[in-house]
């Protein structure tokens, strides 16, 4: 594992200890990285309709989409809405059976593809 990834994971796990999660919410993103096998860069997000383009492919998000943000220092926070996801940012995400994005992790906490 590359050192910068190990550092990001360690820092995120430390920060996650302070992150309150309810039992009904999805698992912490680093506790089960296989949930976030789909990766890409956010091209655009329409917060009014929930439409998002990731890696040139269209997806749909909604108010139930869980958003985790990792900042440049490796700290993990929970986003409140799709508006918290900046364009041209690497993401790892999971989709439901209908293709709707259920969880998204913004930042470099999980290895990303090259742009």
Image (tube, grey):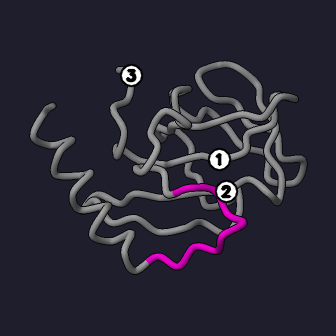
The rendered magenta stretch, by its main secondary structure, is classed as loop
- What whole-number distance in Å separates the C-alpha atoms at marks 2 and 3? 22 Å
- What whole-number distance in Å separates the C-alpha atoms at marks 1 and 2? 5 Å
The answer to which quarter of the image holds residue 11 is bottom left
- Residue 19: image x %, image y %? 46, 76
The answer to which quarter of the image holds residue 42 is top right
Front residue of this view, candidates 11 and 85: 11
- Residue 29: image x %, image y %? 48, 50
Residue 9, numbered circle: none
Asked if residue 65 is positioned above or below residue 37 in the image, the reply reads below
Q: Residue at x 72, y 66 (%)?
A: 24
> Residue beneath label 2, please?
66
Q: Is residue 23 magenta?
A: yes
The answer to which quarter of the image holds residue 13 is bottom left
Residue reaching furthest front? Answer: 23
Q: Is residue 8 magenta?
A: no
Q: Residue at x 16, y 51 (%)?
A: 7
Mark 1 Cα-neighbour bin, 10 Å: few <14, some 14–19, many ≥20: many
Which comes sooner in the sequence, label 2 or label 3? 2
Front residue of this view, candidates 22 and 3: 22
Asked if residue 38 is positioned above or below residue 78 in the image, the reply reads above
The secondary element bearing badge 1 is classed as strand
Question: Left or right: where does residue 102 sit relative to residue 31?
Answer: right
- Residue 106: image x %, image y %? 49, 48
Q: Are marks 3 and 1 in contact (CB under 8 Å)?
A: no
Q: What's the magenta region? A: 19-27
> Residue beneath label 3, please?
113
> Residue beneath label 1, please?
103
């Amino acid at each position: 594992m590359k050192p910068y990834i190990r550092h990001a994971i360690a820092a995120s796990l430390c920060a996650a200890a302070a992150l309150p999660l309810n039992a009904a919410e999805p698992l912490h993103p680093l506790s089960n990285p296989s949930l976030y096998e789909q990766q890409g860069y956010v091209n655009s997000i329409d917060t009014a309709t929930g439409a998002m383009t990731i890696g040139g492919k269209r997806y749909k998000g909604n108010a139930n989409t869980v958003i985790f943000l990792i900042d440049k220092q490796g700290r993990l926070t929970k986003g409140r809405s799709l508006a918290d996801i900046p364009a041209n940012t690497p993401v790892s995400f999971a989709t439901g059976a209908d293709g709707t994005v259920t969880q998204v992790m913004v930042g470099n906490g999980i290895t990303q593809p090259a742009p």
